[in-house]
Image (tube, rainbow, N blue to C red):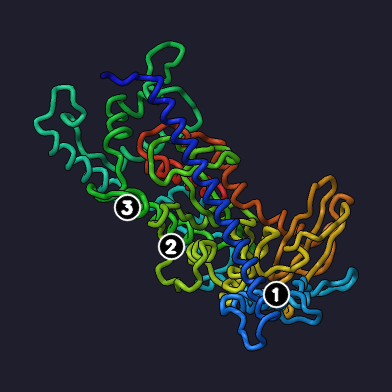
Amino acid sequence: MATPKNGSNARSKRLTAEKVRQMFANMDESDDLESSGSEYNVGNDDEDSDSGSATSRPSTSSASSDRSRQGAAQPEPGPSGERPAKRARTNDEDGWKEVKTGLDLETGNNFRFLPKNGREPGISPDLDLDPMDSPSPLRCLKALLTDALFDYIIQSINDFAAVQVTKNTPARRRSRYASWIDITKQEFLKFLAVLTNMGIDKRAAVQDYFSTQPSQYAPWYHQMFDRERFEVIYHTMLHVDEPDATGKNKIEPFENRLIESYNEAFTPYENVSIDEMIIGWKGRWKYKQYNASKPHKYHIKSFGLVDSATGYVLNLLTYYGAETSYDPDLDDSHGSNSVKIMDTLLKPIGSGYHIFADRWYTTMNLLEYLISKKQYFTGTFQANRVGFPEEIRSKQLQLNYMEHKFWLSEDLRKMCVAWRDKKANKPVYVTSTKGETETVTIKGKEKPAVIHSYNFSMNGCDRADQMVGYYGLHTRKSKKWWKKIFYWMLEITCSNSYIL
């Protein structure tokens, strides 16, 4: 006999579920009865023992349960038998003391300003410039893009092209590899000239620069290059390292060589700033970053060390995740990424510099590390950072508009200031190892001197990004991430040569 498909099966399942629920309900009721019965029986045993013979002993289970209940009811040690309440730490216990308004104090650090190699700040006297001629950006560009660097790039392009031609032999009739000839230094200089002009004269595609249409025709591009020859260098053969280089080795050796020429040409002044410098990139790359608050949401992240007075870029560190090239000599005990970044970027400069950075980097560990390296530091910090004044960390600080407060550490080597600007929703917090409890008046507005110093010197990286952003060479689309960095480095080189 065939079983029904819907009726009895569904009904039996519902009954089974009801039976299961009833079973659990019965189990709960039986547990309650057993527990209440046991208590009742224990009580009867006690009554029987009291009313009957005096020699009868109470049950062991009742005695143990009484002892357990008594043990659980014992209060923890305290003045009143209750758990003592936590007492909030004061600033004095936390290693900080508030400085009253009107007292002129300063941090006790005294580091001598010693640029690396004993050179004076500014343009290096060893820079290869003709003293008889007035310096120009082009002459300074040649001083940064040295002959040794040109030879290195040209050799890398020709070696890579030789490998590609061998792989594609025999080549097809219209193949780019069929008519390849090695690039020369003169031709590469023309290639750089065309790239630079492409950043000024923006067009939709590379082919448009060599168009013969009357509305787009520009004879200069045709005089510099044949279109096919330029495209084979631009799209296919451009390479700046070993032919078989992979990952960060495709661009990092070139980047390091260029940074060396930056530091040989210029010695920074006392104030320098460290901040992110991003390169817009939407292609596929495992180290691509996303931050909706940045001008380019998808980007390649790098960290820059920039002279605050001029905007001259001194050092760069591109982010490659766990493969980022931090300083190998740094002790792992320091741990934090901010210490690793600072230590790596500060290698080209000496001691006694005043470093400015934002709250992403600022930690107490970083302050102690920079003091040990005889470097000053000023930067904003987040209110919940460990080691800073308890009044700030507890978020109990209330300031009126244009009001400020100062704190000094017990060793007098660190200072914190909280200041609320006009129309600001909450205060800003700044710490410094080179600061004074003084105020300055700027445009009729009184503010702490540390705040003014930070605002004045922190804009080095922003100024460098502004200079690079005027020309859009590195904004042109590319499928290769390292080419984005290559074109970006060329624009930074042009900006540095202009500053020189």
Residue name at image x 29 percent, y 34 percent: 233
Disc 2 versus disc 1: distance between alpha carbons? 58 Å
Question: To which residue does mark 1 refer?
Answer: 73
- What's the amino acid at mark 1? Ala
- What's the amino acid at mark 3? Asn
Residue name at image x 82 percent, y 72 percent: 98
- Residue extending farthest bottom: 55
Mark 2 or 3, which is nearer the eye?
2
Residue name at image x 53 percent, y 54 percent: 304
Q: Nearer the viewer, residue 198 or 376?
A: 376
- What's the amino acid at mark 2? Tyr
Residue 418 spot, x, y in % from top left = 79, 60
Any part of residue 478 in sight: yes
Any part of residue 147 in sight: no
Give SS at disc 2: loop
Q: Earlier in the sequence, mark 1 or mark 3?
A: 1
Which numbered marker is on residue 326?
2
Q: Is residue 327 above or below residue 314?
A: below
